[in-house]
Amino acid sequence: MENVLKMKASKFIGMTVLDNDAKEVGKIAELEIKLKHCLVNKIWVATGSALNKKYFSVGEEDLDKVGDYVQLKLNKEGIDLKPKVNKLGELVETGSLFKDIVGKTVLTYDAMEVGKISDMLINPQGCLIHNVLISTGPAFRKKHLKISDEDIHDFGDYVILNLRKEEVNKRITD
């Protein structure tokens, strides 16, 4: 069985991106998420200097390898053909970026607060979200809950789970 890379989305953001000629093209700036479907819709790469930053998106089909670096299948010409934007919000659905989702309050199906989304376990090459990580409890005694797409009932200003409070309590870990 093939070993599937799982990493925290917060660690993936900021990784250096190389083209297929091993030249640095930028850094992972953000992930565009379809949480209800557990998909990373687009990976946004920042390129250029701090004063002249541009963003372009890549999908699963553009990724070659992910390790300590992200290597694309694209060469410089292929990257140059990608549409560029000056601000991430220009081509992104409101509320769909990783930074918009982290910190959202999570509720049980019976409207009890569970905690807040703290991170996601992703497979960058498959553009899949394996689990959404939720922190719960007071700051010095944080506990954690891992959920998958089957556990998500609805997603909007809040995340509502298909789980009742008793089910959540059984799945919370240190």
Image (cartoon, rainbow, N blue to C red):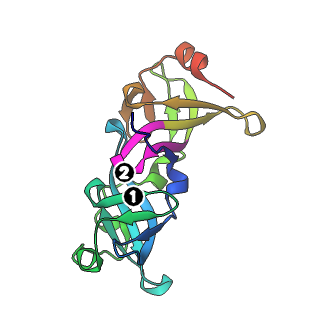
Residue ranking furthest to the front = 1
**Left or right: where 61 falls relative to 104:** left
Q: In this view, does 37 lie above or below 170?
A: below
Q: Which segment did they paint magenta?
A: 118-131
**Left or right: where 68 falls relative to 80:** right
Q: Nearer the viewer, mark 2 or mark 1?
A: 1
**Left or right: where 139 falls relative to 144:** right
- The quarter of the picture where the N terminus appears is top left
The kind of residue tagged 1 is Lys
Q: Residue at x 45, y 52 (%)?
A: 98
Q: In this view, does 61 lie above or below 48?
A: above
Q: Is residue 126 magenta?
A: yes
Q: Which residue is drawn at 41% across and 71% down?
A: 18
Q: Which residue is drawn at 76% across and 33% down?
A: 141
Residue bearing the label numbered 1: 65
Q: Where is residue 61 in the image (x, y as percent from the top left)?
A: 25, 56
Q: Residues within 10 Å of mark 2 (few under 14, many from 20)?
A: some
